[in-house]
Amino acid sequence: MEEMKKEMVQLWRRTVVVEEAEERLCSQLAELEVESLDQAREYESRILFLVDQISRLSSSSLEVIVSNS
């Protein structure tokens, strides 16, 4: 009976350690999700800016071509 109690205590301690590790991993995962969302928003903003710049350059190029014709 004493051996079973020792095993139960060891299992309980392991369970506590595993639960703490799970909490840390969940917290880290949440931080990574927020970081990746921020990066995605920054990339989207940069892409939209570049698309706008390309559009302006293309329009300017067309104006030069038309005016030279």
Image: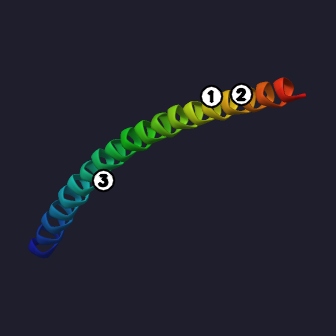
On the picture, is 40 further left or further right than 6? right
Q: Could you say where residue 40 lies in the image, as x and y percent from the top left?
A: 49, 39
Q: Earlier in the sequence, mark 3 or mark 1?
A: 3
Q: Could you say where residue 11 lies in the image, as x and y percent from the top left?
A: 21, 65
Figure quadrant of residue 67: top right
Q: Could you say where residue 17 lies in the image, as x and y percent from the top left?
A: 19, 60
List the residue tagged with mark 1.
52
Outermost residue toward the left?
2
Task: Say which of 56 and 2 sits in front.
Answer: 56
On the picture, is 55 further left or further right than 47? right
- Give me the C-alpha separation between circle 2 and circle 3: 52 Å
Q: Secondary structure at mark 2?
A: helix
Q: Looking at the image, which residue is at 55% across and 31% down?
A: 49
| Foreground: disc 3 or disc 1 | 1
Q: Locate the C terminus by quadrant.
A: top right
Outermost residue toward the bottom?
3
Few, some or many C-alpha atoms within 10 Å of disc 1 (few <14, some 14-19, many ≥20)? few
Q: Earlier in the sequence, mark 2 or mark 1?
A: 1
Q: Looking at the image, which residue is at 12% across and 67% down?
A: 5
Please name the amino acid that badge 2 sits on. Ser
Question: In the image, which disc is placed on residue 60?
Answer: 2
Few, some or many C-alpha atoms within 10 Å of disc 3 (few <14, some 14-19, many ≥20)? few
Q: Are marks 3 and 1 in contact (CB under 8 Å)?
A: no
Question: In the image, which disc is placed on residue 25?
Answer: 3
Q: Secondary structure at mark 1?
A: helix
